[in-house]
Image: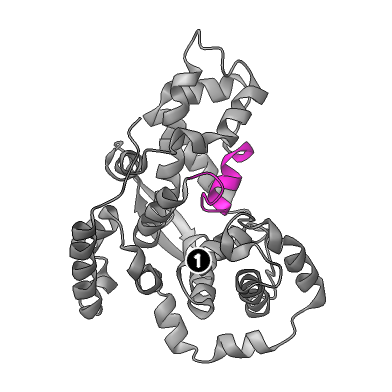
Amino acid sequence: CVRSVGPSPELVRQREAKWINIIGQWDRILLKKSSKVKLQCQKGIPASLRAKCWPLLCGASERMRQNENLYESLDSQPGLQSWVDIIERDLDRQFPFHEMFLSKDGHGQRGLFRVLKAYTQFQPEEGYCQAQGPVAAVLLMNMPAEEAFWCLVQISEQYLPGYYSPLLVILFDAAILSWVLKKTCPAAHKHLQQHGVEPLMFATDWLMCLFTRHLPFNTLLRVWDLFFCYGVSVCVRCCASLLVKLSHLCRPGVKQCPGQMETLERLRGVREHVQEEEETFIAEVTLKRVSAPCLIIPCRGNIHQVTLFV
């Protein structure tokens, strides 16, 4: 396996220049998610520009502009103690070995607390879901707290509506994943069925946490570049690509996954199978296609058509 060393400095500068040009024409180009934007998201957003591009792509910048000073107001309020206690308890579980979150009193954990507390005040009927913790943490690694808060709002309301509430919309996406897997990798689909492994047994954590615990960090950021551009269909495509990578362990005669427990253990350790394959994996998520109908996905009363490419 060849280690991914990332793009050269010259290539990074070229991509930065292209994104700066796109950002300068935001109203004309980005709002329509043009083919030019999609191509640049597939190539990867430069790390220096994710703090600007992610909020623009997901609409967080516009929400922040429409609700000026709202985050500061939420941040200044004490918050409901029951949620505060749960959030405080979870803080040191998010990326415990990352220097930003090592100290309980450091800016990382305190910033994470502020963003999550503000969300419980912004959406009191939903409150806090543990899966939002690692998502907010990755946002904070890439941008200031206010931008991270509004990106979390957009993810929760527009990209993954119902995931962090009792509505269990994730059941619908798990069913889609099963259908996609049957089309793209029938051997893996058959293996999972034979051993009683349902998508909800492993994909719930993948989807709700947006792969924060199951992909190498650089690969995760590339997947999020695509996610903010294309939406939830990227998550289903990513799940399918991960399962295809493990399909060789499910062939007849291969004894690494002889039953349900062994299969689930392999699925929990899926990260090791993409550790050194950032570009290869992104290409699989982006370019491999299956002939599929448009899937109708409900989103807060609106209907969105998403064509799956896996």
Residue 301 seen from this side: no
Horizontal arrangement in the rendering, residue 23 relative to residue 119 (left or right): left
The count of marks equals: 1
Location of residue 77 with respect to 117 vertically, above or below: below
Residue 210, magenta (yes or no): yes
How many residues crowd mark 1 within 10 Å: few (<14), some (14–19), many (20+)? some
Looking at the picture, tell me which residue is in the foreground, 86 or 125. 86
Q: Which contiguous range is marked in magenta? A: 200-215
Q: Position of residue 302 (x, y in %)?
A: 45, 66
Residue 225 % position (x, y): 36, 58
With 43 as the anchor, is 239 left or right in this view?
Answer: right
Q: Is residue 43 visible?
A: yes
Report the side of 226 relative to 169 (left or right): left
Q: In the image as oriented, which residue stretches furthest toward the top?
A: 253
**Relative to 175, does residue 91 appear above or below in the rendering?**
below
Which quadrant is the C terminus positioned in? Answer: top left
Residue tagged 1? 141
- The quarter in which the N terminus is drawn is top left
Q: Under tag 1, what secondary structure? A: helix
Vertical position of residue 64 compared to residue 264: above or below: below
Q: Nearer the viewer, residue 17 or 36?
A: 17
Rendering quarter of residue 194: top right
Q: Is residue 114 magenta?
A: no
Estimate the x, y position of residue 184 in percent, counting from the top left: 37, 30
Quarter assignment of residue 71: bottom right
| Quarter of the rendering containing residue 199 | top right
* Amino acid found under the numbered disc labelled 1: Met
Coordinates of residue 16 in the picture (x, y in percent): 24, 67
- Front residue of 121 and 161: 121
Task: Please say which color scheme the image uses.
Answer: one colour
